[in-house]
Amino acid sequence: MDAAIGRLLGWRKKVEYVKRSDDGAAVKRTLWVVPAGNETGIVPQFTTSIDAAHVAG
């Protein structure tokens, strides 16, 4: 649910495939891009933190 709320507030999901050094297999890595830029971040826990919900609003 927090990801769905984050998307409504402008967070963007970015998926990358990175090769592991030990065997060369591709590993999926999901990153979230903050609404006001191109930096990655952690989507706030809107459903468990009143502070996160307040800052977003």
Image (cartoon, rainbow, N blue to C red):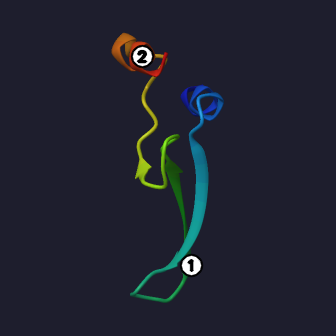
Residue 55, image x and y in percent? 39, 19
Q: Is residue 45 left or right of residue 17?
A: left
Kind of residue indicated by mark 1: Ala
Of all residues, the one furthest to the left in this rendering is 51
N-terminal of the two: label 2 or label 1? 1
The correct choice, above or below, for 38 with respect to 35 in the image is: below
Q: Secondary structure at mark 2?
A: loop
User: Could you say which is closer to the camera, residue 21 or residue 34?
Assistant: 34
Q: Which residue is mark 2?
A: 48
Q: Quadrant of residue 39?
A: bottom left
- Give neighbour class at mark 2: few <14, some 14-19, many 20+ (Cα, 10 Å): few
Kind of residue indicated by mark 2: Thr
The correct choice, above or below, for 28 with respect to 36 in the image is: below
Could you tell me which residue is drawn at 59 percent across and 57 percent down?
14
User: Could you say which is closer to the camera, residue 36 or residue 52?
Assistant: 36
The N terminus lies in quadrant: top right
Could you tell me which residue is drawn at 65 percent across and 28 percent down?
8
User: Could you say which is closer to the camera, residue 20 or residue 13?
Assistant: 13
Q: Which residue is mark 1?
A: 26
Could you tell me which residue is drawn at 54 percent across and 83 percent down?
25
Q: CA distance from mark 2 to mark 1?
A: 33 Å
Q: Is residue 2 left or right of residue 39?
A: right
